[in-house]
Image (spheres, rainbow, N blue to C red):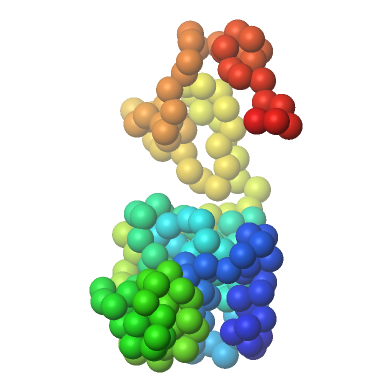
Amino acid sequence: MKSLHDLLDESSASHNHLCPRQILGVRLGLVGIHELGFCEPPANKRLLVITETDGCFADGLAAATGCSVGHRTLRVEDYGKTAAVFVDTVTGQMLRVAPMLDIRQKAYTYAPGEPRHYFAQMQAYQTMPDQEMFTLTAVVLNVPIAQIVSRPGVRVTCDACHEEIINEREIKVNGLTLCQACSRGGYYREYASRSHTVFSRETLALPLLTGKD
C-alpha cells in the first residue's frame, strides 16, 4: 500500500496544490478499503466507490482506491456531501463513510497554534485518528449492483430520439424503449427546435475566447 504522503502527491498532481478536501478524500478512501477487509485496492474491478460529490474530494478518493470514472469503478451521485459508499462487488458488503459532524472543530485540537481554519484542517486531517474523523454505516443500495455495473457490449436505440443507449440505462414505457432524457426529462433542454442544426458561435452570440480573457 502506498504511503499517505505518496497518495497525497498523486491526488494533488493534477491540481498543482493540496487542499483539505483532497486529504479528506484520501483518508476516507483508505478507511473504506480497510473496513471492507482489503490491505490495498483490489484488482479486477472488485471495488465500486460511489462518491457523493465531485471535485478535489473525488480526486482524493480516486488516488486512495484506484477507482476511476473511466473504469466504471467510481460513480458520482452529486449530493454535495464529502462522503462515499464502498461496495465489494463479490461479497455484496457495503458501507458508507462520512466525516464526523464536528470534524472541523476537532481539527484545531490536532493543529495547536494554528488559528486559521483552512491550515488547521490541512495539518489535522493528515494526523487525526480515523475514529476521530469518520462515521461508518452499513448500507444497502436501492439499485442492485448488477444493474449499476451492467454488461459490456449491450446497446439499444431510443425509440424517440434514436440515439444509442449503453450500459442498460434505457427505460421501458408503454412498450417503447426510451432514454432517460426522453422518458422523464434530462438535465438540459434544447436551445431551439428539435433538429440537428449545428450552431456557430456567431449564431449563439457567444463571446470569442482569446488568450487575454
The answer to whether residue 7 shows anywhere in this view is yes
Please state the horizontal and vertical placement of residue 111, each as a whole percent of the image.
41, 85
Please state the horizontal and vertical placement of residue 118, each as a whole percent of the image.
43, 69
Q: Residue at x 48, y 43 (%)?
A: 169
Please state the horizontal and vertical placement of residue 213, each as a whole percent of the image.
65, 30
The answer to whether residue 93 shows anywhere in this view is no
Q: Residue at x 40, y 86 (%)?
A: 113
Depth check: 157 or 120 in front? 120
Q: In screen coordinates, is 184 left or right of 10?
A: left
- To which quarter of the image does residue 44 belong? bottom right
Depth check: 171 or 51 in front? 51
Q: Residue at x 57, y 90 (%)?
A: 39
Compared to 53, does 193 lie above or below? above
Q: In screen coordinates, is 164 left or right of 129?
A: right
Compared to 113, does 82 lie above or below? above
Give the number of marks: 0
What is the residue that sits farthest to the left in this orientation?
A: 101
- To which quarter of the image does residue 103 belong? bottom left
What is the residue that sits farthest to the right in this orientation?
A: 211
Q: Residue at x 59, y 84 (%)?
A: 4
- To which quarter of the image does residue 77 belong? bottom left
